[in-house]
Amino acid sequence: MILQLLNVKILVVGDLMLDRYWWGSVDRISPEAPVPIVKLQRTSAAAGGAANVAANIAGLGGKAILLGVTGADAEGELLRSVLKSIADVELNVLALDSRPTTVKTRIIAHDQQVTRLDHENTDPIAGADEAELIEQAIGLIGSVDAVVISDYAKGLLTNDLLNGLIAAARVTGKMVFVDPKGKDYSKYRGATMVTPNLHEAADACGLSINDPQLVSNAGWRLLSELDLDASLITEGANGMTLFEANGPSTHMNAVARKVYDVTGAGDTVIATLAVAAASGNSLVESADLANIAAGIAVGQIGTAIVSNEELTSAYYAVRN
């Protein structure tokens, strides 16, 4: 029997992005420079960053309360339109004149990414905008079952916002799952779990990526230094390893059969962890489901939303 996933409510706070795709084909190289000429055939748009986390929570059967900012621009309107088309995503999004919507434009040819164009402003949110976000975040804590912090280092998650959010969650007994960014993880102190990948863990702990004991050393160090309940280090083709403050480490082998695109896989992992744990599963059980969900996500091209049905099917396939 599959581990339970309930209609839990998750607050997602983080950097919102519009993932834009230009799809085409290549049949010649430019005479102007040694680059492929992509013949554009169609375009599409998807929720990215924290917005993709919210979309995945909804896909798994939960309800996402999404808090973040966009620019007051056409891209922000498009992102809102994409999110409004997804059932069970509630928007608490500020449109700011002071910054553009973060947009990642990927050019895809023959199912391969040719290049990516980024448009963003990573300056920290400040002043009245920061104060409003802190007030909203703390005000929403009491109505949710867990919190996800999706940090892409685009300026939303200031130290004051993180400190206020994590402190409020601790007071109310709500779990906080963090997809981290940067080298200084002290800003996440007191969260329930952080989920860095290998390179992020190495940077945060000042360790060499070539250290054969990197996963173990980083996993236990993050626990002790940040007062966490757990840390989960994702290892790409090698799977992921969970470290718990009151238990042993648990390694899970990767379950992906084919890897087409790792875009958004971390969003899928953090969304699945939060929904599974808020549904009453242990952190080991939740990480197991997150590992399976990641295997589904990387088997798709572009930003992926993993559904409850897909996860159920994959779970049975792995277990049988």
Image (cartoon, rainbow, N blue to C red):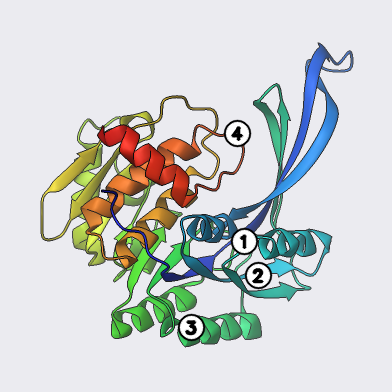
Residue 16's tag is: 1
Decide: marks 1, 2 in contact (CB < 8 A)?
yes
Residue holding disc 4:
301
Residue labelled with disc 2: 69
Q: Mark 1 or mark 4, which has the lower sequence index?
A: 1
Please name the residue shown 82% across and 65% down the image: 73
- What distance separates the C-alpha of mark 2 from that of mark 3? 16 Å
Q: Secondary structure at mark 1?
A: strand
Quadrant including the C terminus:
top left
State the image coordinates of residue 2 (x, y, percent, origin top left): 29, 49
The spot of residue 237 in percent (x, y) is 37, 29
Q: Earlier in the sequence, mark 4 or mark 2?
A: 2
Mark toward the start of the polypeptide (4 vs 3): 3
316 left or right of 39? left
Q: Secondary structure at mark 2?
A: strand
Mark 3 neighbour class, 10 Å CA radius: few under 14, some 14 to 19, many 20 or more: some
- Rendered view: 316 above or below 308: above
Residue under pointer 3? 140
**Sequence-first tag of 3 and 1:** 1
Q: CA distance from mark 4 to mark 3?
A: 34 Å
Q: Is the Cβ of the residue at disc 4 closer than 8 Å to that at disc 3?
A: no
Rounded to the nearest angstrom, the CA distance separating label 4 from label 2 is 26 Å
Residue kind at label 2, given as amino acid type: Val
Separation of marks 3 and 1 at Cα, in angstroms? 18 Å
Asked whether the residues under the numbered discs 4 and 2 touch, taking CB atoms below 8 Å apart as contact, a structural biologist would say: no
Residue 23 in the image: above or below residue 135: above
The first of marks 2 and 3 along the sequence is 2
Question: Which residue is painted at 38% across and 68% down in the image?
Answer: 187
In terms of image quadrants, where is residue 153? Answer: bottom right
